[in-house]
Each structure stands twice: as C-alpha cells, then as structure tokens.
Image (spheres, rainbow, N blue to C red):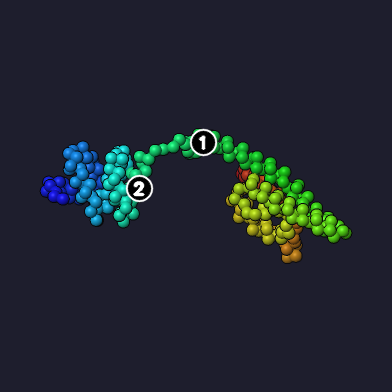
Amino acid sequence: MATDPDTSSAYEQLRKVVASDVKRARRDFRVLRGGAPGVFQEFLEFASRPGEGRVRQMIATAARVERFAADIEPWLRRWLAVESDEFARTAIESALHADAPRSAKQPPGEQLPPSFVEAYRFVSERLCHRVRNSLTIPVASLVSLEQLARRVGDPSVRDELLAVIERLRPAVQRLSQIVEFDTGDGYLTIQSVALGEWLEAAEPSFRTRFGHATLTLIGSAPARRLRIWASPFLLDTAFGNLWANAVQAVEVIAPHLARSQWS
C-alpha cells in the first residue's frame, strides 16, 4: 500500500510524542481521528507494524477512555491476536471490554454507607457469639455421652451408641465452623489440653486482641504440664475475658495511683 509522505511523517512525530508525553500524544491522536478517514486508517495501519506496542497501547487507552473502541474493534482484535507487549495487551483487552453490554447488578459493597456495613458486622458477630455459646452444652454432652456409652455392658448396644456418636461429632463440628471466623477445625471440640503450654502460646494473641499485659505462670514443672479437658473456644473465652478485664482494671486504676503518688 502506498503511503502519503506527510502521513508517514506525522505518524513518526506522534510515535516520538508517545515516548515522552502520552497525554499530549492522546490529544494529537484525537485531532487526527477527527480528520480525513483515509488518514486515520493509514495511521492504524502504521500502528499495526511490529515494534509499535507503545503506540497501540496509547490508541487502545484513548479508545477506552473516549468510548470509541467499537469504531476500531477490528483493529483492536487484530492487534490482540499478535500483541507481545504485556501493557499493550492489557490496554487492548480493557478497550474491548469497555463497550461490552453491562448486565444489571447490585451496587458494589464499598458504595454502601459505612454505617450499614458496621451494623451488619456487629449484628452478625453478636448472632454468631450467641450460637457459639449455645453449642458448648451439646458439645460437652456429646463427650459425656461417649464416656457413658463405653461403659455399657451389652456390646451390640455399646457399638450402636458409639456409631451414633461418631455421626454426631462431625455434624456438630460442621455446625461450629459455620459460625466461626478464621478458625481451624475443632475450635469447639473437647480435647485434652496442656494448660500451661496453651496459655503461653495464647499470650501474643491475647496481647494483640485485648491490650498489652505480661503473663507469668507460677508453679512446678508437673503443674505446668497439667492437662485438662476443654475446647479452644472455652479456653479462649475464659482466659480472654480474664485478660481483657485485667487490662481494663489497670487502665482505670493506674491514673488514680499516679495522682495519689503526686498528691
């Protein structure tokens, strides 16, 4: 195809501007697009040559922002099929999707008033807290039921009871997971726990969640290795409340102690 020397020169000038000032290049390209159709088509042909990814990126971005991607869709698809420049490909794909028909959808969550989001979070957390508290008795009763079942003298009855318990246990665990946030399996499962080790491991979490404090375990080595039957949820609730109450008490008392020392 024969090319107009003036058009070729204008393209080379635009090519240089793209490398130094993309916004200016887009303005110049807008003027060009409003000119003779033949010249515009020739520019698109120049932009189709290998090594012109930066120019194609500029054109695709302009097509997306100025909403004329549909007018040059055949060119965009032709470029996309052979484009090797990552940034140019992204710009071309965005331009092609810009004019795609949009299905009706709900406004994104971030557009909701912040108060709505906070109210939802508060209500959901309180509801989950109530359900978790209600689950503690069934979980503990399941442990007691298993212990009693193992003492049944009739082997067939004992096996049948234990089979029922084995079906109940995962069901209760699944129910507990439904109302837990970011917790692993077994959060409500009664299990043998080395209390001293558990408390030492929980200290960083308590400090982060409830306030700065220092935990000191006093007792013999055997006492520190003492194991109890409990669930992580019960331990977290009991000792987390103690930690939070202690921090709050110090925050209330400390100012009065400071004033008494200076009075």
Q: Residues within 10 Å of mark 1 (few under 14, many from 20)?
A: few
Tell me the crowding category of disc 2: few under 14, some 14 to 19, or many 20 or more residues within 10 angstroms, Cα based. some
Taking the image as drawn, is residue 50 in sight?
A: yes
Residue 43 got which mark?
A: none
How many angstroms separate mark 2 from mark 1 (CA)? Answer: 33 Å
Q: Say whether residue 176 is left or right of residue 88.
A: right
Spot occupied by residue 154 in the image (x, y as percentages of width and height): 87, 58
Seen from the viewer's position, the closer of residues 215 and 102 is 102
**Measuring 31% from the left and 38% from the top, which residue is drawn there?**
67
Which amino acid is tagged 1?
Pro
At a point 67% along the width and 47% down the height, the residue shown is 175
Image coordinates of residue 94 in percent, x first then y, are: 35, 45
| Tag of residue 114 | 1
Give the amino acid at mark 2. Glu
Residue 51 lies in what quarter of the image?
bottom left
Which of disc 1 and disc 2 is earlier in sequence? 2
Residue 32, position as x, y percentages in the image = 20, 41
Q: Residue at x 63, y 44 (%)?
A: 251
Q: Residue furthest bottom?
A: 221
The image position of residue 17, as x and y in percent, is 21, 48
Q: Which residue is mark 2?
A: 93
Secondary structure beneath dot 2 equals: helix
Please give the name of the residue rendered at 18% of the width and 38% of the height, measured from the top-left corner: 35
Q: Secondary structure at mark 1?
A: helix
